Image: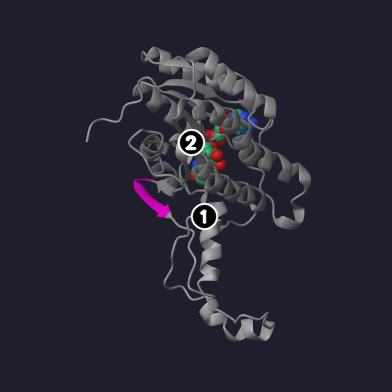
Amino acid sequence: MGKINFSGRVAIVTGAGGGLGRTYALELAKRGAKVLVNDFGGSRDGSGGGSSMADAVVEQIKAAGGEAVANYDGVHLREGGENIVRQAVSAFGKVDIVINNAGILRDKSFTKMDESLWDPVLAVHLKGAYNVTQPAFVNMRENGYGRIVVTASGTGLFGNFGQTNYGAAKLGLVGLMNSLRIEGEKYNIKVNALAPVAGTRMTEDIMPPEVFQKLNPEFVTPVVLYLCSETCTDSGRILCAGAGLVQTAFILVNDGAFLGGEPSTPEAVAEHWAKITEQSNLKKLNNVMDQSMEIMKHYS
Ligand code: NAI
């Protein structure tokens, strides 16, 4: 297989001033992409802000002979998303790739999870992906090409104590992907999700130092670059990646139990519980129509 190349491609990477996003921006530029490096520049909980993080990455790309522009908008704002896409189109003419990577954390156990912790986390991760991706999708549709990555997380897929806000936002992104991949299908726009594991400022105090050292973000970078490339023709995947291991997470259904053609009882549900929850004959459904077909096959 030939080398994966991004020359002629324009990429937007949100939250690219540090951590994982920085590595995506650097590698995309190294392989020929023109990159809009977005970063709001705040602290881990989203407070503050500034231009220095995005500027430093742009300088590094330019010093290596690449092309990049810096953007300091917050993805949590609708006008932030519009500015990001407008700037990419005015600097480079179009948008081919969007990596929704910007993120913050405001952890607290659920009874203490007030709106000042809930709303900003949903705004940056979930609304942020909508804010940036929607104007970009309009441009991609006109060009008949696009690659979009949303950043989910193990918390969204599997759960973690103290992260109900973050987990809700992260699995929400999988929901966004599931429908957007269907809307993008006929325009050659592929949408995939990533659940990374990496040692960054987001994880530095929750991982033992020896684990943190091993989780170099650069292990995740090739997976994201593949998902953003022409070579990747898959859409709707959920990739888990960290420290050299790359896996796929699936949302599957089992055969379940058919409780009959008339409304049944909670006792019947209890009676069939083992069959309803059995972890065998798992299959992937392609869309919501497939779910209806699962029901209808009991009536044919
Ligand atoms: P990070 O904190 O180093 O990077 C996040 C970046 O987003 C920061 O540079 C920050 O300034 C920027 N940002 C925050 N709010 C923003 C806003 N409103 N607009 C624009 N930029 C904003 O953390 P890391 O680890 O690199 O995280 C990248 C993504 O990966 C995040 O979405 C995170 O939730 C996700 N993730 C990371 C994991 C890990 O193990 N590091 C695990 C699972 C998911």
Magenta part mainly helix, strand or loop? strand
- Secondary-structure class at tag 2: strand
Q: Amino acid at mark 1?
A: Asn
**Residue segment shown in magenta:** 243-248
Residue contact at pointers 2 and 1, CB within 8 angstroms: no
**In terms of depth relative to the viewer, which is nearer, 96 or 166?**
96
Left or right: 168, with 179 as reference point: right
Q: Is residue 296 magenta?
A: no
Q: Which residue is mark 2?
A: 148
Query: Which quarter holds ligand 1?
Result: top right
Q: Residue 83, position in %: x, y?
A: 63, 21
Residue type at mark 2: give it. Ile
Quadrant of the image occupied by residue 41: top right
From this viewpoint, is residue 130 visible? yes
Q: Is mark 1 within 8 Å of ligand 1?
A: no
Q: Quadrant of residue 71?
A: top right
Q: Residue at horizontal 57%, vertical 17%?
A: 87
From the viewer's perspective, is residue 64 above or below residue 102? above
Residue at 62% x, 81% y: name it: 269
State how far apart marks 2 and 1 are (Cα). 19 Å
Q: Is residue 106 left or right of residue 170?
A: right
Disc marking residue 287: 1
Q: Residue at x 51, y 80 (%)?
A: 275
Residue at horizontal 53%, vertical 19%? Answer: 88
